[in-house]
Image (tube, rainbow, N blue to C red):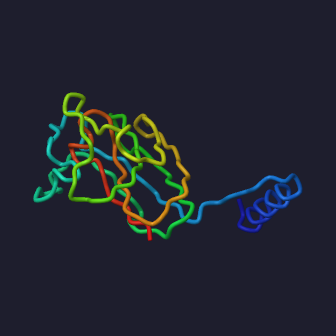
């Protein structure tokens, strides 16, 4: 779509929303997120979770999350998430954390983070390889973690931190 037509379409939608009493909210910032792995046949490490990784060489992680930026202003944030894996399902869970040196509540039996014990504003649930999804949330200042909570993925290094100022 040409830029002028796109601006016209956005403006028309906003005016229509005002006339109809609808509130339109566009994200203040968009973060592009890629969920990646080294392939389903790659052996996964088990000590790459948040506090587990202190002192570990994260270049050995076999799974991860890449973000277009790791620092944003507080406000409405959209996460555009793509699973770039060719053979593994992934997800992105967003949670607020107070201390990066403390482990997230981890259920070793299930090999995943106890999501019910972690304050989280949302997630993009399981995405098949090549699929995309998005999440728009209003974030206050603080530190957040984006992680995949499918069994073994978090401990294999599939997480990253986001600073909201």
Indicate the quadrant where residue 67 lies. Answer: bottom left
Q: Nearer the viewer, residue 34 or 138?
A: 138
Residue extending farthest to the left is 55
Residue 59 at x, y = what percent?
Answer: 17, 56
Residue extending farthest to the right is 19
Residue 12 at x, y = what percent?
Answer: 83, 60
Q: How many marks?
A: 0
- Side of 140 where 62 appears, left or right: left
Q: Nearer the viewer, residue 105 or 19?
A: 105
- Quadrant for the C terminus, please: bottom left
- Side of 3 where 22 appears, left or right: right
- Side of 59 where 89 appears, left or right: right
Residue name at image x 33 percent, y 39 percent: 149
Residue name at image x 23 percent, y 52 percent: 50
Indicate the quadrant where residue 160 lies. Answer: bottom left
- Quadrant for the N terminus, please: bottom right
Residue name at image x 21 percent, y 43 percent: 155
Quick check: 62 above or below 144?
above
Quick check: 134 above or below 4?
above
Residue name at image x 48 percent, y 48 percent: 121
Residue 161 at x, y = what percent?
Answer: 33, 59
Residue 140 at x, y = what percent?
Answer: 49, 63
């Amino acid at each position: 779509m040409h830029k002028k037509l796109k601006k016209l379409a956005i403006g028309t939608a906003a005016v229509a929303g005002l006339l109809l009493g609808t509130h339109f909210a566009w994200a203040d910032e968009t973060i592009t997120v890629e969920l990646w792995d080294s392939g389903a046949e790659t052996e996964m490490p088990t000590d790459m979770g948040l506090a587990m990784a202190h002192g570990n060489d994260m270049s050995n992680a076999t799974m991860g999350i890449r973000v277009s930026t790791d620092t944003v202003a507080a406000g409405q944030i959209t996460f555009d998430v793509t699973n770039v894996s060719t053979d593994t399902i992934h997800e992105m869970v967003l949670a607020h954390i107070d201390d990066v040196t403390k482990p997230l509540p981890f259920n070793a039996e299930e090999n995943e983070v106890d999501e019910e014990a972690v304050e989280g504003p949302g997630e993009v649930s399981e995405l098949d390889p090549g699929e995309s999804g998005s999440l728009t949330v209003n974030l206050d200042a603080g530190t957040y973690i984006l992680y995949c909570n499918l069994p073994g993925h978090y401990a294999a290094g599939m997480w990253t931190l986001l600073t909201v100022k």
